Amino acid sequence: MKEYTTEFLRNVALVSHGGAGKTMLAEAFLHATGATTRLGKVEDGTTVSDYDEEEQRRKISLYASVIPVEHRNHKINIIDAPGYTDFVGEMISALSVADGAIILVDAVAGIEVGTELAWKYADQFNLPRFIVINKMDRDNADFAKTFAAIEAFVHSHGKRVVQVHIPIGEKQDFKGVVDVIGMKAYLGDGKQIAEIPAELKEAADRAHFTMVEDAAEGEDELMEKYLENGSLTDEEMVRGLEDVVYAGQFVPVFCAAGGREIGIIPLLNDMIDLLPPPTHAPKRTAMGKEGEEELKANDAEPLAAYVWKTTADPFVGKMTYFRVFSGVVQADAHVWNQTKGADERMSGLHFQRGKEAIPTKIVHAGDIAVVSKLTVTVTGDTFCDRGHPLTIKTPTFPAALYRVAITPKTQADAAKITPTLTRLCEEDMTLSWQNDPITHETVLQGMGDQHIDVAINRAQTKFQVGLNTQEPKIPYREGITRKASAQYRHKKQTGGAGQFGEVHLRIEPLPDAEFEFTDELVGMNLSRSYLPPIEKGIRATMERGAFAGYPMSNVKVIVYDGKEHEVDSKPVAFEIAGREAFKLAVQDAGPVLFEPIMNVRVTVPDANMGDVMSDLNARRGRVQGTESEHGNTVVIAHVPMAEMLRYTTQIRSITGGRGYFTMEFDHYDIVPTHIASQIIEKHKKEMEAKKDE
């Protein structure tokens, strides 16, 4: 691969709903430009971009991969991002380092949920974009219908479409495209140029006329010229289109069939002509010593590079993908990782094309490259010059709300759980893990069941760590609702010294504190020296639970009497007596279970609001109110955590994937008796089973 400087680079993210054909389109770009000798297929697991064995097994993209395509002396870094909702983090990472987005739309399915998501995140990064109607060779492909739907969709988001391609034929007869800019027909992959077919001439003229009008809006000078002459030259038209597309006012629409390599070259031409080079890309900033600094894509500027992806492989080691926003990176040079405050050496600097590594000595401003075997760098870090510290802000990722509890398969795996989960979460910004202090479980959080499944498989194949998953326990709490008292005598007589202790105590609810232990001892029945072991026994019971196996809190304990024996009384006897007296008192104190209640905000299309509300009611939810935001309703509700474990999957199925939610802990509330009795029963059975073992 030759060396490309900033103005000859384009960074384009391919995004869409899952299954719209991004990976095959990238494959077609490579084949049409001669980078590969044959076209791979997703179903055979032979594409350049889906090279991970897990991707080949599932036949979907799971990770964003970079596919550099060389065309007309330019290098286009195509970032093929997954379309499946669970892997939206990879799509966000891809868009965060792109200067333009290509949103694919399936010619049969039209606008889908993933199309809306891709659009939403392209907006987040303010990216100019193309829409490509792909799979035009499918049996039910309908260009006119899909184009009309796209036009309405784009319009509803305050932008306008400009038709660049007219398909020549459709379905099985899809042969090529008419490019309205140069008014030429491109047959097959586009290397063969022909005259526009007679039956499409009129439509092409109309589209060309509209395009000239649109292009004239790009610059005042062009508008004046257009009003004077009624036309613009091809060069002027491209210049005007460039302005309106860079600014994001217009969205050009193309058509193609990636799997059959139709319309490929004209699409690549327009990427070079109409999507911005790094020098004209949307403005990027970084935090410097003095505050925000604008980054300029120029080799002479101070270095600012953002790490957008890291992968660990037992054979290759760690690979760090970065995008240079300003400055330049030389092979073997030292750079400063500002996020970690550490020096890193750029050894093994290369460009990645699928799994193929292409070594390079230099990475110019605006380019995307990979460096291997760094020591401390993880996703989200910034490289800069030590003397000129800069930090690039990481994009906002959606909160991970799908939780599973993780246990090791074997004793050997147990030791490796922490480092493995840490590495998985370093690679993927939408994964997180923690040890739950109440349930003592290791909990992994992700975007959905597929996402977690892939992470668990990755732990097994890449790090050789076997993990099992199950539903996480709910951090219930035990509590009491009224005062009660009890007494207990512990007496054990075996040969020699025995054990003796008797405790009389009272308990009462304590709303404003976790625990209080006092005494009202008078006279000499019980010496105060035995109070610490009594408290120790009670505290241990409260930690483990007095009746359902969950921690207890908000209790005040008053020891008011007891008995001791001058020979047989020992601290351990009072520890036991205190514990048992406490358990007896709890049984009379109106024991209840408390459960965490979450504050849930569900954003849904208006049409699904009724279904979502009734589903929340079925989950014991209490709707607190609604808000509306462009075409969507936000339902705010208090819902028990126990009812929200698999809500990620549920909300997708109720709303056809269009709804999403956020939740955070709000307060604890009493578990209804019929549910609490099941939990207590289950705990009893577990305890009995343990006794029998």
Image (tube, rainbow, N blue to C red):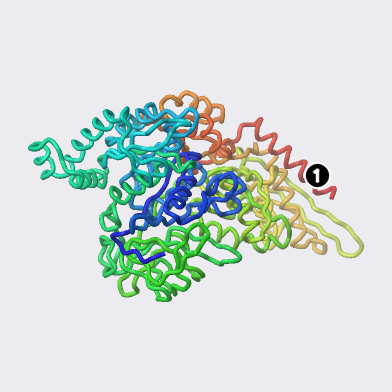
| Front one among 35 and 624 | 35
Q: Quadrant of residue 644?
A: top right
Q: Is residue 408 left or right of residue 300?
A: right
Q: Is residue 611 above or below residue 556?
A: above
- Can residue 468 be seen in this snapshot? yes
Q: Residue at x 51, y 61 (%)?
A: 356
Q: Classify 10 Å Cα crowding around label 1: few (below 14), some (14-19), many (20 and above).
A: few
- Residue farthest along the left direction in this orientation: 228
Residue 144 percent coordinates (x, y): 37, 27
> Dividing the image into 4 quarters, which one contains the N terminus?
bottom left
Residue 522 percent coordinates (x, y): 66, 54
| Front one among 186 and 68 | 186
| Front one among 167 and 597 | 167
Q: Is residue 562 left or right of residue 1?
A: right
Instruction: Look at the numbered disc 1 and give the secondary structure of its residue.
Output: helix
Q: Is residue 664 left or right of residue 178?
A: right
- Residue farthest along the right direction in this orientation: 495
Q: Is residue 201 above or below residue 117?
A: above
Q: Is residue 96 above or below residue 248?
A: below
Q: Is residue 550 above or below residue 497?
A: above
| Front one among 195 and 275 | 195
Residue 476 percent coordinates (x, y): 61, 43
Q: Is residue 303 left or right of residue 425?
A: left
- Can residue 663 be seen in this snapshot? no
* Residue for badge 1: 688
Residue 553 percent coordinates (x, y): 59, 47
Q: Amino acid at mark 1?
A: Glu
Q: How many marks?
A: 1
